[in-house]
Amino acid sequence: VDALNVGSDVYDRNTGDLFGKITDKSVESATDNIVKPDGNMVKAEIPGKYKVTLKIEMECFNRDGEYYMENNTAIIKNGTLYLATEKANTSGTVQNVTEVK
């Protein structure tokens, strides 16, 4: 969590190509559904695990309504990105793609 910081450059973990820069970050505790001894299911926090949401500003081009990086990597909602920063390697799911003009 502490290795992903606003202002950090983010790279494609597989190619080393620059994705962009982290412009916003939010953190919340990770949760999972567990079954209690009485059979009821409840949502419980997972100690030491977090859900991190990053906003990454990147240069892309629009081709037929889809966004691509210069190296033709598609940036697709619900797609997976494999990310690297100076301090961390991780992956995440694209939640939203917004064009800024």
Image: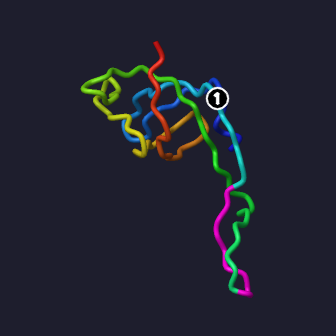
Q: Who is closer to the viewer here, 29 or 48? A: 29
- Magenta segment includes 28: no
Residue at the image position 74 percent from the left and 87 percent from the top: 38
| 2 to the left or right of 80 | right
Residue at the image position 73 percent from the left and 87 percent from the top: 37
Residue at the image position 66 percent from the left and 39 percent from the top: 3
The outermost residue toward the top is 101
Q: Position of residue 84 (x, y in %)?
A: 51, 38
Is residue 98 depicted above or below 92 in this figure?
above
Looking at the image, how many numbered discs can be counted on the residues?
A: 1
Is residue 62 depicted above or below 94 in this figure?
above
Residue at the image position 52 percent from the left and 31 percent from the top: 10
Is residue 38 depicted above or below 45 in this figure?
below
Colouring scheme applied when the structure was drawn: rainbow
Q: Mark 1 points at which residue?
A: 24
| 51 to the left or right of 71 | right
Q: Who is closer to the viewer here, 89 or 32? A: 32
The residue type indicated by label 1 comes to Asp
The outermost residue toward the front is 40
Decide whether the magenta segment is chiefly helix, strand or loop.
Answer: strand
Where, quadrant-wise, is the N terminus in this rendering?
Answer: top right
Span highlighted in magenta in the image: 30-38
Q: Where is residue 86 in the image (x, y as percent from the top left)?
A: 58, 33
Q: What element carries label 1?
A: strand
Q: Residues within 10 Å of mark 1 (few under 14, many from 20)?
A: few
Q: Position of residue 59 (x, y in %)?
A: 42, 20
The outermost residue toward the left is 64
Quarter-wise, where is residue 67 in the image? top left
Quarter-wise, where is residue 65 in the image? top left
Quarter-wise, where is residue 97 in the image? top left
Q: Position of residue 60 (x, y in %)?
A: 38, 22
